Image: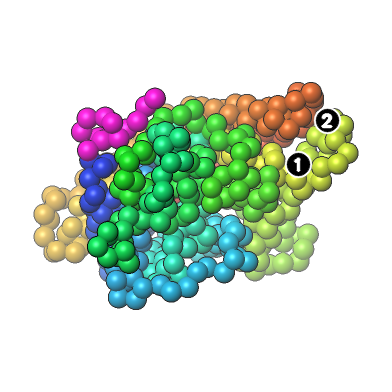
Amino acid sequence: MIDLLQWPVIGPLLRWRHARTSLQLVLLAAAALVVTHGLFGPQTAPANLATVATWIHYRGLLVLALLAAGNVFCTGCPFVLVRDAGRRLHAPARRWPRIVRTKWIGIALFATVLFVYEWFDLWALPRATALLIVGYFASALLVDVVFKGATFCKYLCPIGQYNFIASTLSPLEVRARDVERCRTCATVDCIKGRRSAAAPALVLQRGCELALFLPAKVGNLDCTFCLDCVHACPHDNVAIGGRMPGVELWDGRRRSGIGRLVRRPDIAALAAVFVFGALVNAFAMTSPSYAAQHWIASASGVTAEWALLALMFGGALVGVPALVFGVASAATKALAGDQSTTLRRVGTEYAMALVPFGLGVWVAHYLFHFLTGLFTIVPVAQSAAFDLTRHAILGEPAWRWIGFRPGTVYPIQIGFILLGTVGSLAAAYRISEREYPARATAAAAPWLVTTMALAMVALWILNQPMEMRALGLAG
């Protein structure tokens, strides 16, 4: 079994108690630089760190990290570092209300971010992007100095929800090395934290703030890769192990901190927004999206831009998924001869099967901007250094540095969409084998057709002319 914690160099580094804090400090410094330049630097998007670093490089590196390793950016999240500092001044005393211990608020915030990004053209607004980052820090701080645990991460953070669902396709997971050893553990420090023998009230090392008990943990959902369990476990029984990406999508076991996925319609809804959000986010950067808005305006009489976008996003993130899931679920029930299961439960069972396709679309979209603007960070950083210090400490900006030609990136985009499609086809069939073993092929057929249809839509979007927004900066 692959276990990164046992590898030379990498293992000791990950076990180092200050490894996460060091990464957080680096990203905090980067965030401070981005915010400063966004607020006080030139408000031309392609020349400002806030827009270039956030909408080109951060998003590209985010999906690459998820594909290559796991939820790395949650590991180094600087918001958590700031909220930890705030908790030293004001320790949280309340628990997040049980009635809202779901993903629904996080889903709404995720959809809102997608909508606001398009409405305000955030890729073109350095100061607004900087203020969004500041707002993120403030929100994490305010929530987590009031409520215990990782409340903001688990239930509210839009980036966190995106990372959780995407990391189901990551090749690494944190898990117990020997489950039997966990069953004999009397202290369960991985959850409760390791306390001082002399002063039991003193927590020397906190346990998992997301309530993921390692022996019952399945996959990466809700795991921030914080490695608190690694440091808290007194038996050295935690591994960062390799696995087949996506295997947890059809795993029907009860999961610590989550329960059974078939009983979590909120997580199914998160998967749906993740998938259809990828399509509408990519579609919005093409010329036909404006034609669609004109059609909506003619059909509805609505003329305000925000209202047109709200109708388009509402249809794409609520109406279309409800229709697609309803039809596919009804077809599965009919083909499988299932008279007892509700449409809602069938849709919840199969929602996770579409996640690989969704991630393929997100990767294709974000890599386009990342690779075509790969080297722009160099001249923008040089320019920012001069703007902030009034000295060319990094040299004169090399504005000719851009990135790969779009035609070079196109085959890569196609490859990721097709790879994601194949992953979803496999996941749908494996779920059918679990739920309808006697009629697996028939039960899976509607979802295989749905996946193929969505893939055709994604490929069509990929071949549409792009709107040259913000001098081609982002979309």
Q: Where is residue 349 in the image (x, y as percent from the top left)?
A: 70, 40
Which image quadrant: the N terminus?
top left
Quick check: 222 left or right of 445?
Answer: left
Residue 336's disc number: 2
Above-or-below relation of 468 to 248: below
Please name the residue shown 59% across and 66% down the image: 98
Q: Is residue 277 visible?
A: no
**Residue 305 in magenta stretch:** no
**Residue 6 in magenta stretch:** yes
- Residue where numbered disc 1 is placed: 346
Along the viewing direction, whichever of 61 and 471 lies nearer the viewer: 61
Specify the amino acid type for callout 2.
Ala
The magenta-colored residue range is: 1-12
SS under mark 1: helix
Above-or-below relation of 285 to 390: above
Along the viewing direction, whichever of 23 and 223 lies nearer the viewer: 223
Q: Position of residue 170 (x, y in %)?
A: 46, 36
Along the viewing direction, whichever of 418 and 160 lies nearer the viewer: 160
Q: Position of residue 68 (x, y in %)?
A: 39, 34
The answer to whether marks 2 and 1 mark residues whose Cβ atoms lie closer than 8 Å is no
Q: Is residue 451 visible?
A: yes
Q: Quadrant of residue 408?
A: top left
Please name the residue shown 78% across and 40% down the image: 329
